[in-house]
Amino acid sequence: MPAESFISPTKPRVALHSSTLTFHFTDIEGSTSRWEHQRATMSPALVRHDAIVRAAIEDHGGQVFKTVGDAVCATFTRAADATLGARDLPGGTVFPWP
């Protein structure tokens, strides 16, 4: 069923865009435990993390649209750019956490 056919009875109809977006989501595995046990070191690590992730996304034409804790949500207009942005993110062994 086309998206245009979903009409809310309580909200006015909104024109839908026909472009394609690629969504990119990141999250730090095990961060809840780290925040509970190493709060003093996690705060500066998260600032560094956010700067690195944002740079990798923006360097490849992506746009961060939301952050929640250590999670980052972004969009790209080209899937290839999202792949390159993800490739440029360091893994846990390159970017050690407290």
Image (tube, rainbow, N blue to C red):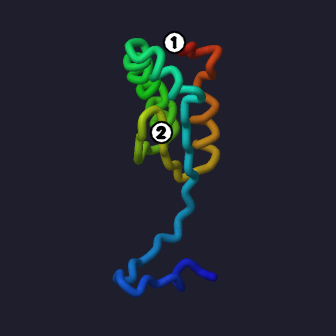
Quadrant in which the N terminus appears:
bottom right
Which three-letter amino acid code belongs to the residue tagged 2? Val
Q: Residue 2 is drawn in which quadrant?
A: bottom right
Residue 98 at x, y percent in the picture? 51, 12
Where does label 2 land, which residue? 72
Residue 6 at x, y percent in the picture? 51, 82
Please report the residue visible at 48 percent of the width from the left and 44 percent of the height from the top: 73
Element class at badge 2: strand
The answer to which of marks 1 and 2 sits earlier in the sequence is 2
Q: Nearer the viewer, mark 1 or mark 2?
A: 1
Where does label 1 land, which residue? 98
Which three-letter amino acid code belongs to the residue tagged 1? Pro
Element class at badge 1: loop
Please report the residue visible at 59 percent of the width from the left and 29 percent of the height from the top: 29
Q: Residue extending furthest front?
A: 36
Check residue 68 in the rendering and tell me which mark sits there, or answer none. Answer: none
Q: Viewer-proximal residue, 61 or 49? A: 49
Please report the residue visible at 46 percent of the width from the left and 74 percent of the height from the top: 16
Residue 33 at x, y percent in the picture? 53, 24
Distance from the alpha carbon under mark 1 to that under mark 2: 19 Å
